[in-house]
Image (cartoon, rainbow, N blue to C red):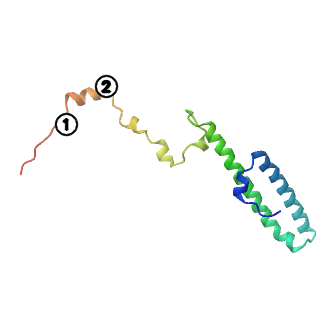
Amino acid sequence: MARVKAYELRSKTSKELLKELDEMKAELSQLRVAKVSGGAASKLAKIKVVRKSIARILTVYNQKQKAEARKQYQGKKYQPLDLRPKKTRAIRRRLKTEQKYAKTQKQKTRMSNFPMRRFAVTM
C-alpha cells in the first residue's frame, strides 16, 4: 500500500479507520514474515512505511475519539480529567478569583465602618 495521508484519513469514519488499521497490521505481519524468510529489499523498506501509516491511522482515530468526547461533554458541569485544561498542578489547585476575593459578612461590615485612612502628604 502507498503512504496514507492524514487529511485523507480525517474524511473517513471511525469504522473505516479501524478496518484500514486491521489491513495495515495484517500487511505488516506479512512483511515481517518475508523479512525472516529472506524477502526482497523492497519489502524490507516497506516495513517502515507501513509502521508509520499505522501510527497515522491511530493518531487520526484518537483525535476523532477525543473530539467526539469534547462535543459530548460541552457545557456539562463535570468533564473527564483528560478533557480538562492541563496547565500546572499549582494553577489547578489555586483558588478561583471569586473565592480569592470573597469576604465574610463581618469583614464587609468592618470595611464599611472603618475604611482605610487617607493621608495628604505635604512637603
Relative horizontal placement of residue 21, taking residue 34 as reference (left or right): left
Q: Quadrant of residue 111?
A: top left
Q: Quadrant of residue 75?
A: top right
**Residue at image coords 78%, 66%:** 48
Determine whether label 2 and label 1 are within 8 Å by CB: no
- Closer-to-camera residue (102/28): 28
Relative horizontal placement of residue 69, taking residue 91 as reference (left or right): right
Q: Amino acid at mark 2?
A: Gln
Relative horizontal placement of residue 30, taking residue 9 as reference (left or right): right
Disc 1 packing (10 Å; few <14; some 14–19; many ≥20): few
Q: Amino acid at mark 1?
A: Met
Residue with the mark numbered 2: 105
Q: CA distance from mark 2 to mark 1?
A: 18 Å
**Residue at image coords 20%, 33%:** 115
Q: Element under label 1?
A: loop
- Closer-to-camera residue (66/102): 66
Residue 34, percent across and down? 91, 67
Residue with the mark numbered 1: 116
**Residue at image coords 82%, 68%:** 46
Q: Element under label 2?
A: helix
Above-or-below relation of 4 to 75: below
Q: Which comes sooner in the sequence, label 2 or label 1?
A: 2
Relative horizontal placement of residue 95, taking residue 8 as reference (left or right): left
Q: Which mark is residue 26?
A: none
Residue 57, percent across and down? 74, 54
Disc 2 packing (10 Å; few <14; some 14–19; many ≥20): few
